[in-house]
Image (cartoon, rainbow, N blue to C red):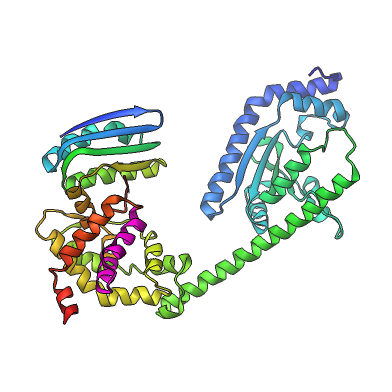
Amino acid sequence: MEVFIEKENNVTTARFVGRLDTPASQEVSQSIEPILNDPTGTIVLDCKEMSYISSSGLRIFLTIRKAAAAKGGNVIVKDINNDIRQVFMMTGFLNLFEIQ
Amino acid sequence: MKRLLDQHAEQILQEYRDNLPEFEKQAHEIYQIFQETFERIGLIVAGLEYRVKKEDSLAGKLELKGAKYKSLADITDIIGVRVITYYSEDVDKVASAVDRLFVIDWENSVDKRKLLEIDTFGYMSLHYICSKKDFPFRFEVQMRTILQHAWANMNHDTGYKSGVEIPKHYMRSMNRLAGMLELIDEEFSHIRVELADYRRRVQALVASGNLDDAPLDGETYRSYLNLNPFRRLNKTIAAINQAEIQEVSLLPYLEVFKNLGFVTLGDIDRLIKNYSEAAFQLSSYQISLTDLDIISSSLGPQNLCIVYIIMNGGGTAGLRKLFDTLNGPNESNEMMAQYILDQASELPFMNEKKK
């Protein structure tokens, strides 16, 4: 799993590529530190190239959501595939994020 | 602007310059005292601001009436703090707080609300001249409602102190507005009192279990959520995979319940009693063969709504509307609705329904 982070104006985009499973989560936790250090504005979690998410991945998304909420930021989850959408639904995460 | 100041005024001005850093420090401290106090007593104010008088403003004051002041200590508004409240009774609450926090110079404090005659309307504000132990200079605290503040600012901006004589019809209009705003202030207070009373009655209804008498609205629903009505179902679902439950706000479900045609808290209570087993079956089917070990506390109400819609013939259209409400309209909501409907057809509660 790779995470590419870009910031333009007030929008931070994190592009997730690959499987966000338990082994990948530890590395991803470090990759997203720049977002957690400055969770302001709009944060887009671009999942177009993410094929899978585990509970650990959901926890990472939740951490970003909490950090953003504390600083008045807004998190958008973008382009999740149907399998991931079902995981969000099965866990009650579907309405925790703005999903586009 | 160049001011024509006599030697006495210049001395006061120099005293001001010498003490300016201390004024700035004290002004900030006073501001913080207010901030901390409001937070402690849970008072939400519309505004809290402070300023240290600018040198030019002080020079202007000295130019006009410098002889009135023996020393800088006689000028009581070098530091000015303004508290703007939402409600008129909160002005009195702030005044009581000021009385507890500082020493009030009553002789020089003015309640402009009481100065107006019964048949006149105009500037309404409470001004206290105060002092604090560790600071030899007095300071001014102005307290007013947000509407009084708006009126005072408008009045100020449109001519007051400008030196131009104000036409009578304009004064009349401004004073008429002041009367109207006073009425609105009073009405806001009445609404607040009535709302507080409504909240208490709703809490009593919820506590007594008379949920059918509690209409479904934002107030009643909030009180109901305090009882954690979905906790048992969430715990049962979480037990499937020994999952942790992430607590989230369930307020978005108010709109969902209204869309389902629920009109009282009793309707939600019956939803929980009659559909929890089916909601559990759905979750069990979905997650028991996964390693998902985290759920949000909205899963219980979400699945209750899903099974309610399915069992009452809402079909994909009903489910899509549910997802549209919770997540915003999205093409994938149709797919999700169909997916869940297919899953549900395999579950015992659907077969029981057929019987």
Q: Residue furthest left?
A: B289
- The residue lying toward the viewer, choosing from B82 and B76, is B82
At 40% from the left edge and 69% from the top edge, which residue is drawn?
B224
* Observer able to see residue B245: no
Percent x, y of residue B81: 66, 40
Is residue A6 rendered magenta in the image? no
- The residue lying toward the viewer, choosing from B102 and B345, is B345
User: Number of labelled discs?
Assistant: 0
At 67% from the left edge and 54% from the top edge, which residue is drawn?
B91
Q: Is residue A70 above or below residue B90?
A: above
* Observer able to see residue A27: yes
Q: Which is the main secondary structure of the residues drawn in magenta?
A: helix
Percent x, y of residue B260: 36, 69
- The residue lying toward the viewer, choosing from B347 and B188, is B347
Q: Is residue B140 left or right of residue B265?
A: right
Instruction: Pick the quarter of the image with the C terminus of chain B.
Output: bottom left
Q: Look at the image and give the residue range highlighted in magenta.
A: B302-327
Q: Is residue B69 left or right of residue B353?
A: right
Q: Is residue A52 left or right of residue A5?
A: left
At 75% from the left edge and 20% from the top edge, which residue is drawn?
B14
Percent x, y of residue A38: 36, 33
